[in-house]
Image: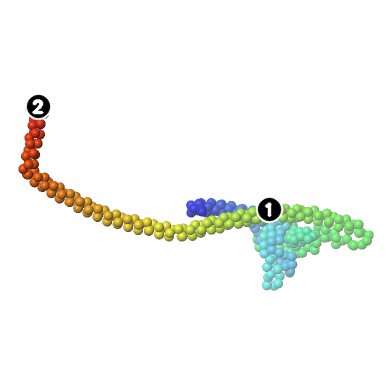
Amino acid sequence: MATPKTIDNKFLSIEKRGGIFVIFAIIGIVAVAFFIGLQQNMFTPKVNIYFVSNSGKNIKTGAKVVFNGFKIGKISSVNLEEAGNVKAELSINRDYIKWIKKDSVARLMKELAIGDSIIDITKGSENTKIIAENDFIAFERARWFPAMEDEINTIPITLTNSPFITDIITELKTELQGEINPVLENVKLALKNFRTLSEDALITRQYLDSMYQNADSNLNELNTLVTQLNVDIPNIIKSVNKSLDSINLMATDFRKVTINAFAEIIEVINDGATILGETEDVVDAVKQIWPISSKIRKRADIKEQIIKVDSYE
């Protein structure tokens, strides 16, 4: 059976490991949030401008805003006004606002043939002033790919120019492949990262499950120990009480025996003293008897003579 000290050490070890895991998890979450913030330009100063459309079709919050194919911001909000028009607010990085002029146009178009909608802002005139904070920008919807729209509108579709149309379609296919392949690679990379993240999450979950199981096992051992102590301690107390009662009883009996023995010893000593006194009286009486007293005197004289002979006088 595990002792309380062993159980405490186990709990301390679990708490330390759990604390370290939580600290690293928090640090990881903060780092990921900071990285995402950097990727989304959340820490870059922004300038807000807006456009108005008669329809909110394909205008979505978060859609990219590009200038000459380069991302410079995003749609931060899309709201329906009281007049029924749709007002879209664009959040532009302050460093790029200098390229947007008063006569620039925000064009809603598809990034790819089957891609998401984006806002493409035209360059505007060089001599026109730069657009200011919360200014209005003109808006229009592009019908197709702007780079090819004008050419396609001028081409009559007939059997005589079908090879030319085929070339255009081939060129369009090549362009789409060039655009789609990087997207597919990014999707594959994202799926790979997601798979790795899922595996890490599974390992983390397994570790947490193991830690919880160990904690449950330790708690069960502690409960068993406490239960056993609840049973053993009363028995030990009863045994100690019985032992103390026996010791008290023995001490009482010993005290009684000691007192009785001491009284008997005193009585024997007194009787011995009485007998000794009586014996001395008998001896003295015997000494006074005539035949014996003479014998005692003679022996005393003889002893005195013997002592005088042995002396140096």
Instruction: Report the number of numbered marks.
Output: 2
Q: Residue furthest right?
A: 160
Amino acid marked by disc 2 = Tyr
Q: Earlier in the sequence, mark 1 or mark 2?
A: 1
How far across and how far down the image is residue 15, in percent? 53, 54
How far across and how far down the image is residue 121, in percent? 73, 59
Of tags 1 and 2, which is closer to the observer? Answer: 2
Quarter of the rendering containing residue 143: bottom right
User: Depth check: 172 or 95 in front?
Assistant: 172
Mark 2 neighbour class, 10 Å CA radius: few under 14, some 14 to 19, many 20 or more: few
Apparent side of residue 126 relative to residue 215 in the rendered image (left or right): right
**Which residue is labeled 1 in the image?**
196
Q: Residue furthest top?
A: 312
In what element is the residue under mark 2? loop
How far across and how far down the image is residue 116, in percent? 75, 61
Q: Which residue is rendered at x = 31% and y = 55% of the image?
A: 251
In what element is the residue under mark 1? helix
**Which residue is labeled 2 in the image?**
312
Amino acid marked by disc 1 = Thr
User: Depth check: 121 or 240 in front?
Assistant: 240
Mark 1 to mark 2 CA distance (whole Å): 129 Å
Where is the C terminus found, in terms of image quarters? top left
* CB-based contact (under 8 Å), mark 1 and mark 2: no
Q: Which residue is rendered at x = 80% and y = 53% of the image?
A: 178
Residue 106: tell me if it is visible: yes
Q: Which residue is rendered at x = 8% and y = 43% of the image?
A: 287
Mark 1 neighbour class, 10 Å CA radius: few under 14, some 14 to 19, many 20 or more: few
The numbered dot on residue 90 is none
How far across and how far down the image is residue 253, in percent? 30, 56
Apparent side of residue 17 relative to residue 178 in the rendered image (left or right): left
User: Depth check: 15 or 167 in front?
Assistant: 15
* Scheme by which the image is coloured: rainbow
